[in-house]
Image (tube, coloured by chain):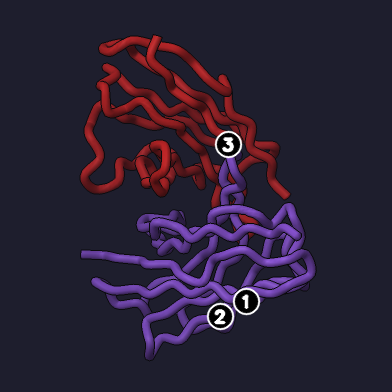
Amino acid sequence: QVQLVESGGGLVKPGGSLRLSCAASGFSFRDYYMSWIRQAPERGLEWVSYISRSGDTIYYADSVKGRFIISRDNAKNSLYLQMGSLRAEDTAIYYCARGGCRGGSCYLDAWGQGTLVTVSS
Amino acid sequence: DIQMTQSPSSLSTSIGDRVTITCRASQNIRTFLNWYQQKPGKAPKLLIYAASNLHSGVPSRFSGSGSGTDFTLTISSLQPEDFATYYCQQSYNTPPWTFGLGTKVEIK
């Protein structure tokens, strides 16, 4: 079955860096676009970043642009999020999600369990 | 960026009730609107895509409608497992694909 497993979260000081990973299994990873979505404690969902199937098209939310880098390794069935210049407001559970599109309409049809990133001194 | 406004932010209801949640986009997004369900401590799950299409495995008591700027998620007869928070998300054009702030469905 489709499985997405995030890792790499933890406690980091403001200004620090962290790299999140998402291991995919149960589907052909290279055939799907992927996204990162985050959820601050007791808050709603915030879309963070998108990467196309080949990795040549990337988008970021304004809140992370210039600080975060999304990437993927299709040979390793893995998605990554390199996070830098971290701020307290980046504290959240980070989910990776698989993207699907049908008839031109795109959606997130599989999610990992999330990994918690805490930015605090 | 396109803003998504959900209402209500929370509602108290009973088993068997009909529940309606609305989502309004700040501009015309045609039918590029998805709905997700999230239970406490769990990842979100896709319910409805393209405004009215039921995702695989989702019970038929869930339905979605709307186009343009106004959308609705309806649960025809609320079941115990439906108590959760529901989010709309627009996927119009290229990202950013924004979410609404969520609607928490609670037991009365």
The type of residue carrying mark 3 is Gly
Does residue A31 appear left or right of residue B23 in this picture? left
Find disc 1 in the rendering and name its residue: A82
What chain does badge 2 belong to?
Answer: A
In three-dimensional space, the C-alpha distance between marks 2 and 1, rounded to whole angstroms, equals 8 Å
Q: Quadrant of residue B85?
A: top left
Secondary structure at numbered mark 1? strand
The colour one sees for chain B in the rendered image is red
Q: Are marks 2 and 1 on the same chain?
A: yes
Find disc 3 in the rendering and name its residue: B68
For the residues bearing labels 3 and 1, Cβ distance under 8 angstroms: no
Identify the residue at image location x=61%, y=50%.
Answer: A46
The type of residue carrying mark 2 is Ser
What chain does badge 3 belong to?
Answer: B
- Measuring from the top left, give residue B19's x and y in whole percent: 39, 17
Secondary structure at numbered mark 2? strand
Q: Residues within 10 Å of mark 3 (few under 14, many from 20)?
A: some
Q: Give the answer, above or below, for where B36 lies relative to A31.
A: above
For the residues bearing labels 2 and 1, Cβ distance under 8 angstroms: yes
Q: Give the answer, above or below, for where B102 lies relative to B91.
A: above
The type of residue carrying mark 1 is Gln
